Image (spheres, helix red, strand yellow):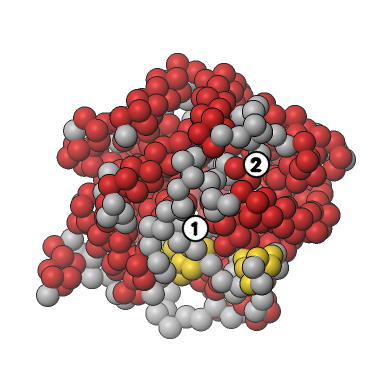
Amino acid sequence: MGDIFLYNRYNMAILEKPTRNFLPNDLIIDEWKKLEKYFEDLKSREIKSKADLEKWLKDLSELEAVVEEDEAWRYIKMSINTADENLRNSYSFFVTEIQPQIAPYSHQFDLKLVNSPFLKELDFSVFEIPIKRAQKNIEVFREKNIPLISKLQTKAQEFGAINGKMEVEVNGEVVTMPKAGSLLKDTNREFRKEVFEKIGNERLKHASNLDDLFDDLIQKRHELANNAGFANYRDYMFAAMQRFDYTPQDCFKFHDAVETQLVPVLNQLAQERKSKLGLENLKPYDLAVDPNQLPPLKPFDGAEQLVSKTIESFGKLDVYFADSISTMQKLGHLDLESKKGKAPGGYNYPLYEIGVPFIFMNAVGTVRDLVTMVHEGGHAIHSFLSRDLELTSFKSLTSEIAELASMSMELLSMEHWDSFFENENDLKRAKKEHLEDVLSTLPWIALIDKFQHWIYENPNHTREERHAKWLEYHKRFSANCIEWSEYEDFRKTMWQKQLHLFEVPFYYIEYGIAQLGAIAVFRNYKSNKQKAIEQYKQALALGYTQSIGKVFETAGVKFDFSENYIKELATFIQKELNSI
């Protein structure tokens, strides 16, 4: 009865898709012809009034939700089992046979909206963002790029397939790379060294293939940008990603601010670690182990426990948050444990028609997995809070807004991680570990983003130049007391583990911008818990109906990544660390 009461209270009995008004409820997308007439209807439909335009927008929204959800399920299923050729073919069918057909229509729809004589009658405060997005889409669209975009999407799949094959043998057992990575928390230094070298050597076995793949992606992306009239792919992506609120120059300021304000903090933390471990040389395999030589924390055992404890901790923040995860569990919208053949990483995939997203991850029982779960849980709650917005485009979020939701949830939920750790000392260890990760993640984000800018500003570089540039930047954005001399080969290819570089280029600086916002949300929470949670929910409920700055303002924080602001927030986190 309790669950039913909560669902009724928060109107979350969302166990079925809503009845469709434009498309048939039994539509199966197994050929383009089944969709074509609906696209043709929208393309040719005469709009004679504001009411006609609003109806056209709602029908377009329904079509977008249905098609995007169909693609989502194909991608999710392929991610869960990369070895299944049928699942790979199903996704490939969509990106090669369906998406290329949709692209010209999407362009026509953008033109139809922007050029409609009734556009001025719409409430601009509501439709400003969709109009700006349509205008930007028109700017970057080139019909000759449609097959190239399809090739790029198909090609990028190879990253997951290559990584899905990586595995190492430890103590006679063949384990996935995420599982092997968790062993670097072991207190036996020789064992850590052995595991680290096995991971590094396994990655080196595939490094050439990943370099080949990346070379191909770079050249195709540069061609795509040139076709659209841009000097390089970076400039194309800033337009294609509709970054209205900041420029590449702002990113460079972020890189510089992180280097001056946070890399010294990294050095300090690394020196403290080296001292506590009593080491003459701090090696890369010494960075995950507890500095007090305590065994790795085990916040949960298995996916079922991860879910139940997440629901419990979320419920202590706000019962709506707990109900969101419970609903996903009931629908089977969670696949959390690491297993052979599964793609790397983790994500929350929004499903715009049913309104209940899907969380995918590779949990092996670590604190990092706990953080990933609450991070993706923040994305999921964002989907729930914005699901009733009128148009699909309102729910299609800019990354900076999306990551504000997820990164804030990491820090907010941390206050209730006693659901995962009954022992007070374990709880303190987990909090300290995460806050240190928050500080150390910002330099990694700056590093990846700076590296991407260089890659696409110099698309004809050799792989040797690429590795050299990575090493140069890695030295600037990492603690200088870590001894890498034996592992330069491992170090120069570290970038290859970053999924974003291969699959979603330039989608990474958002994490840094959002992390600053999340720290500020957490700071507000420490001052006034109820107010901070309400502001957080109000901001997420906006979806992408307002500018990034307005959403941040609604959350009670600044959209700012200046040197002074970064210093201010870093000081707050350091004080929190000292108080644990």
Q: Is residue 431 left or right of residue 197?
A: left
Label 1 secondary element: strand
Residue 365 placement (x, y as % from top left): 45, 61
Residue 75 placement (x, y as % from top left): 57, 68
* Residue visible at 42% across and 79% down in the picture: 24
State the image quarter where residue 333 is shown: bottom left
* Residue visible at 61% across and 34% down in the picture: 279
* Residue visible at 65% across and 41% down in the picture: 284
Q: Amino acid at mark 2?
A: Pro
Q: Amino acid at mark 1?
A: Tyr
Q: Earlier in the sequence, mark 1 or mark 2?
A: 2
Residue 361 placement (x, y as % from top left): 50, 62
Q: Mark 2: few, some, or many residues within 10 Å (few <14, many ≥20)? A: some
Foreground: 419 or 95? 419
Q: Mark 1: few, some, or many residues within 10 Å (few <14, many ≥20)? A: some
Q: Is residue 136 left or right of residue 61?
A: right
Which corner quadrant holds the C terminus?
top left
Marks 1 and 2, Cα distance to the nearest angstrom? Answer: 27 Å
* Residue visible at 80% across and 59% down in the picture: 205
Residue of label 1: 347
Residue 357 placement (x, y as % from top left): 40, 63
Which corner quadrant holds the N terminus?
bottom left
Q: Nearer the viewer, mark 1 or mark 2?
A: 2
Foreground: 218 or 473? 473
Q: Considering only vertical position in the picture, is 351 above or below 297?
A: below
Residue of label 2: 284
Foreground: 522 or 224? 522
State the image quarter where residue 569 is shown: top left
Label 2 secondary element: helix
